[in-house]
Amino acid sequence: MKTYIPERMEKNRAWVVIDAADRPLGRLAVEVANALRGKNKPVYTPHVDTGDGVIVINAAKVKLTGRKEQLKVYQRYSGYRGGLKETTAAEMRAKHPDRMIKLAVKGMMPKNTLCRNAFKRLKVYADASHPHAAQKPRQG
Protein backbone atom coordinates (compact mmCIF):
# COMPACT_ATOMS: atom_id res chain seq x y z
CA MET A 1 0.00 0.00 0.00
CA LYS A 2 1.31 3.42 -0.96
CA THR A 3 1.04 6.62 1.00
CA TYR A 4 -1.15 9.11 -0.82
CA ILE A 5 0.45 12.53 -1.32
CA PRO A 6 -1.77 15.31 -2.68
CA GLU A 7 -0.59 17.13 -5.78
CA ARG A 8 0.04 20.86 -5.63
CA MET A 9 -3.21 21.63 -7.45
CA GLU A 10 -5.24 19.65 -4.91
CA LYS A 11 -4.01 21.84 -2.06
CA ASN A 12 -5.99 24.92 -3.08
CA ARG A 13 -7.29 26.67 -0.01
CA ALA A 14 -10.85 27.77 0.42
CA TRP A 15 -12.16 30.05 3.15
CA VAL A 16 -15.09 29.01 5.31
CA VAL A 17 -17.32 31.24 7.46
CA ILE A 18 -18.70 29.56 10.58
CA ASP A 19 -21.35 31.25 12.71
CA ALA A 20 -20.75 30.58 16.43
CA ALA A 21 -24.06 31.96 17.68
CA ASP A 22 -25.82 29.55 20.08
CA ARG A 23 -23.42 26.67 19.37
CA PRO A 24 -21.59 24.80 22.15
CA LEU A 25 -17.95 25.86 22.39
CA GLY A 26 -16.43 22.38 22.26
CA ARG A 27 -18.44 21.17 19.28
CA LEU A 28 -17.66 24.35 17.40
CA ALA A 29 -13.95 23.99 18.18
CA VAL A 30 -13.89 20.42 16.80
CA GLU A 31 -15.43 21.57 13.52
CA VAL A 32 -12.98 24.48 13.21
CA ALA A 33 -9.93 22.34 14.06
CA ASN A 34 -10.91 19.70 11.48
CA ALA A 35 -11.36 22.37 8.79
CA LEU A 36 -7.98 23.96 9.61
CA ARG A 37 -6.21 20.59 9.35
CA GLY A 38 -8.15 19.49 6.26
CA LYS A 39 -9.66 16.38 7.87
CA ASN A 40 -13.00 17.11 6.23
CA LYS A 41 -11.50 16.68 2.72
CA PRO A 42 -10.93 13.44 0.81
CA VAL A 43 -7.31 14.47 0.06
CA TYR A 44 -6.38 14.66 3.78
CA THR A 45 -2.85 13.52 4.51
CA PRO A 46 -1.45 13.81 8.05
CA HIS A 47 1.96 15.14 7.01
CA VAL A 48 0.73 17.67 4.41
CA ASP A 49 -1.14 20.88 5.16
CA THR A 50 -4.35 20.56 3.11
CA GLY A 51 -6.60 22.64 5.39
CA ASP A 52 -8.76 25.66 4.68
CA GLY A 53 -8.89 29.10 6.23
CA VAL A 54 -11.66 29.55 8.79
CA ILE A 55 -13.49 32.75 9.73
CA VAL A 56 -15.59 32.50 12.91
CA ILE A 57 -18.20 35.21 13.45
CA ASN A 58 -20.43 35.97 16.47
CA ALA A 59 -17.83 34.66 18.92
CA ALA A 60 -19.44 36.61 21.77
CA LYS A 61 -22.64 34.54 21.38
CA VAL A 62 -21.04 31.10 21.73
CA LYS A 63 -22.88 28.85 24.19
CA LEU A 64 -21.36 27.35 27.32
CA THR A 65 -23.38 24.53 28.86
CA GLY A 66 -24.10 24.05 32.54
CA ARG A 67 -22.49 26.47 35.00
CA LYS A 68 -19.29 26.91 32.97
CA GLU A 69 -19.94 30.64 32.60
CA GLN A 70 -19.11 31.12 36.30
CA LEU A 71 -17.00 28.02 37.07
CA LYS A 72 -14.68 27.67 34.04
CA VAL A 73 -11.35 29.37 34.75
CA TYR A 74 -8.71 30.33 32.18
CA GLN A 75 -5.17 30.51 33.60
CA ARG A 76 -2.02 32.08 32.24
CA TYR A 77 1.36 32.30 33.90
CA SER A 78 3.91 35.06 33.37
CA GLY A 79 6.87 33.02 34.61
CA TYR A 80 7.43 35.16 37.69
CA ARG A 81 6.54 34.38 41.27
CA GLY A 82 2.92 35.28 41.91
CA GLY A 83 2.40 35.70 38.16
CA LEU A 84 -0.58 33.37 37.79
CA LYS A 85 -3.53 35.22 36.27
CA GLU A 86 -6.98 33.65 36.46
CA THR A 87 -10.02 34.73 34.44
CA THR A 88 -13.51 33.24 34.49
CA ALA A 89 -15.37 32.50 31.28
CA ALA A 90 -17.81 35.38 31.92
CA GLU A 91 -14.93 37.86 32.21
CA MET A 92 -13.25 36.39 29.12
CA ARG A 93 -16.48 36.71 27.13
CA ALA A 94 -16.82 40.35 28.16
CA LYS A 95 -13.19 41.35 27.46
CA HIS A 96 -11.91 38.96 24.76
CA PRO A 97 -14.68 36.80 23.26
CA ASP A 98 -12.44 35.72 20.38
CA ARG A 99 -9.84 34.28 22.76
CA MET A 100 -12.28 31.67 24.13
CA ILE A 101 -12.63 30.08 20.70
CA LYS A 102 -8.93 30.38 19.85
CA LEU A 103 -7.89 28.62 23.06
CA ALA A 104 -10.43 25.82 22.54
CA VAL A 105 -9.30 25.22 18.95
CA LYS A 106 -5.62 25.39 19.84
CA GLY A 107 -6.11 22.74 22.52
CA MET A 108 -7.69 20.38 19.98
CA MET A 109 -4.89 20.58 17.44
CA PRO A 110 -1.62 18.64 17.63
CA LYS A 111 1.36 20.57 18.92
CA ASN A 112 3.60 20.57 15.86
CA THR A 113 4.84 22.94 13.17
CA LEU A 114 2.16 21.92 10.70
CA CYS A 115 -0.67 22.85 13.03
CA ARG A 116 1.02 26.01 14.28
CA ASN A 117 1.06 27.23 10.69
CA ALA A 118 -2.54 26.11 10.16
CA PHE A 119 -3.64 27.99 13.31
CA LYS A 120 -2.55 31.25 11.64
CA ARG A 121 -5.43 30.79 9.17
CA LEU A 122 -8.03 31.08 11.96
CA LYS A 123 -9.73 34.48 12.15
CA VAL A 124 -12.25 35.06 14.95
CA TYR A 125 -14.57 38.07 15.29
CA ALA A 126 -16.92 38.96 18.15
CA ASP A 127 -19.76 40.22 15.93
CA ALA A 128 -21.24 39.30 12.54
CA SER A 129 -18.98 41.47 10.37
CA HIS A 130 -15.55 40.51 9.04
CA PRO A 131 -13.08 42.14 6.59
CA HIS A 132 -12.44 39.00 4.49
CA ALA A 133 -14.87 39.52 1.61
CA ALA A 134 -11.97 39.41 -0.90
CA GLN A 135 -11.32 35.74 -0.04
CA LYS A 136 -14.87 34.85 -1.19
CA PRO A 137 -15.64 32.65 1.83
CA ARG A 138 -18.38 30.05 1.68
CA GLN A 139 -20.78 29.30 4.51
CA GLY A 140 -19.76 26.30 6.59
Image (cartoon, rainbow, N blue to C red):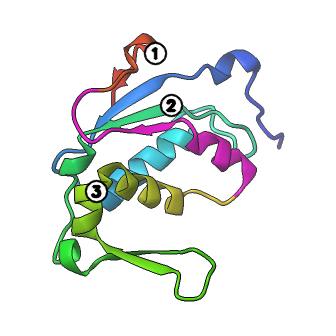
Check disc 1 and give the amino acid type: Gln
Badge 2 density bin: few <14, some 14–19, many ≥20, Cα 10 Å: many
Cα separation between marks 1 and 3: 28 Å
| Closer-to-camera residue (96/121) | 96
Residue at 22%, 37% in the rendered image: 127
Q: Secondary structure at mark 2?
A: strand
> Is there a contact, CB below 8 Å, between mark 1 and mark 2?
yes
Residue 114 visible in the picture: yes
Does the magenta segment cover residue 31? no
Which part of the image, by quadrant, shows the N terminus? top right
Name the spot of residue 13 as percent of width and height, x first.
57, 23
- Which residue is identified by label 2? 53
- Which residue is identified by label 3? 95
Name the spot of residue 106 as percent of width and height, x first.
52, 57
Residue at 43%, 11% in the rendered image: 134
Count the labels in the image: 3
Instruction: Please identify the quarter of the rendering in which residue 21 is found.
Output: top left
Extreme-bottom residue of the structure: 81
Depicted 101 relative to depicted 1: above or below: below
Depicted 40 relative to depicted 72: above or below: above
Choose the circle earlier in sequence order: 1 or 3. Answer: 3
- Which residue is identified by label 1? 135
Q: Nearer the viewer, mark 1 or mark 3?
A: 3
Choose the circle earlier in sequence order: 2 or 3. Answer: 2
Q: Is residue 29 left or right of residue 14?
A: left
Extreme-right residue of the structure: 2
Check disc 3 and give the amino acid type: Lys
> Is there a contact, CB below 8 Å, between mark 2 and mark 3?
no
Which part of the image, by quadrant, shows the C terminus? top left
Does the magenta segment cover residue 127? yes
Depicted 53 relative to depicted 124: above or below: above
Range of magenta residues: 112-129
